[in-house]
Image (cartoon, rainbow, N blue to C red):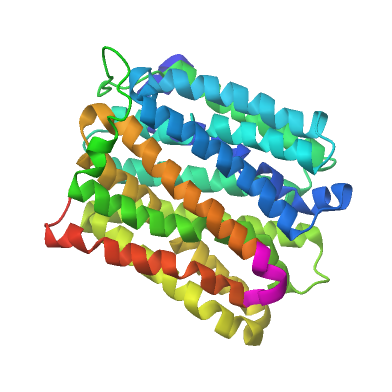
Amino acid sequence: MRHFITQRPILVIVLAQLCGCSLWFSVNGVSMGLTDSWGLNASDLGRLTNAVLAGFIGGTLILSISGLADRFRASHIFVVSAFLGALANLSFPLVASNLHEGLIVRFLVGLCLAGIYPTGMKLLVSWSESSPGLGLGLLVGMLTLGTALPHGLTALELTADWRSTLILVSGIALIGGAMVWLLGDGPYTTRQVGSLRWGAIMQSFQISRFRASAMGYFGHMWELYAFWTLTPWLVRESLGSRAPSEEVALWSFAVIGIGAFGAFFGGWMSRVIGSAHVARISLALSGLICAFYPLVASSMGVLTIGILLVWGFFVIADSGQFSAISSQACPRDLVGSALAMQNSTGFLLSVVSISLVTGLLDEWGLSVLWVLIPGPVLGVIAMKSLFVQGSLAK
């Protein structure tokens, strides 16, 4: 078993990322059952999502500012985080009984995810130094499938109720940690030596290529998680209020899960036209759909599911490419910290956008999607300097 894993490191890492990141939207995947059980509304679900993001932001800030992300082995951080994240997620159905307790638990899950997502990217770079765009596209694709997985489990009714689904997700996260434990770090690993370098990460933001990539990523993140949070509501609006919850869950899984193919496509295209071009085109297309969707959705009925699928494809196709550009632009011994800081800031913006759209949803309806437009627009503008300076590595 160990021989199989060490001979196929990229496959192992992306599958482990799928398992670990299933923790991320595990509660959103059971939102229908949880709403009935706890009497929640759309704003409460937004708060639960933001609790995860707040924990993730806090964790990535600690890892990046302290330099811990580059001081310890990426595989060790991943394994410990997956184990603790599974335990935290398990406590949601077994211990938490109301929204306030649920918020605390989800914050802890987010804290653990900080040691899974950016660390997984560093781990992949340590095994695939020459073509990170392709590898990171695959990895983000697995993050997307992990995000969609709880919706799929709910739709297939593989578990008795929402509590059973969360217990199953915790087991899946443990499998991801075990895979990385057997794999270990790659041959291109670089770690900091000596004392902790508090604040060294700011060196990366002084590099124009890293700064341009990070700004594009921030625009992408303003849109991405708010869209994913709204996906079950958008699907229900398209299918009609009487649509069975299983059907809503199935189409929500499809709309989010198709992003995995978008991320794979982005990784493949990065080898043809370069990561910067893939990121800019995907971000622009996603922004255009965001702008026009409220204008056409009311007149197209269930056909809007097709538009949501296209949106779900492009909304994530650029994510891995931003990470690829940034990982190549920053100093080698700061890759983990730089990606963690980029993630932290991006998810902080996601908290703001999710709060806005969920808070305005009941009053604005579909028009609330226009709150997301500034992200793609400003992101595309910020990326202009990447092309003025010449093409980045593919």
Q: Position of residue 143 (x, y in %)?
A: 50, 43
* Residue 69 placement (x, y as % from top left): 38, 25
- Quarter location, residue 249: bottom right
Outermost residue to the bottom: 299
Q: Residue furthest top?
A: 194
Which residue is located at x 37 percent, y 53 percent? 217
Q: How many marks?
A: 0
Q: Which residue is found at the position 63% from the left and 31% from the top?
A: 108
Main secondary structure type of the part rendered in magenta: helix
Question: Which of the pair 280/71 is nearer the observer?
Answer: 71
Camera-nearest residue between 236 and 348: 348
Q: Is residue 183 magenta?
A: no
Residue found at x 69% / y 65%: 233
The range drawn in magenta is 359-366
Q: Is residue 16 left or right of residue 68?
A: right
Instruction: Using the rendered view, name the quadrant where residue 112 is placed.
Output: top right
Placement of 313 over or under 239, stated as above or below: above
Q: Is residue 384 visible?
A: yes
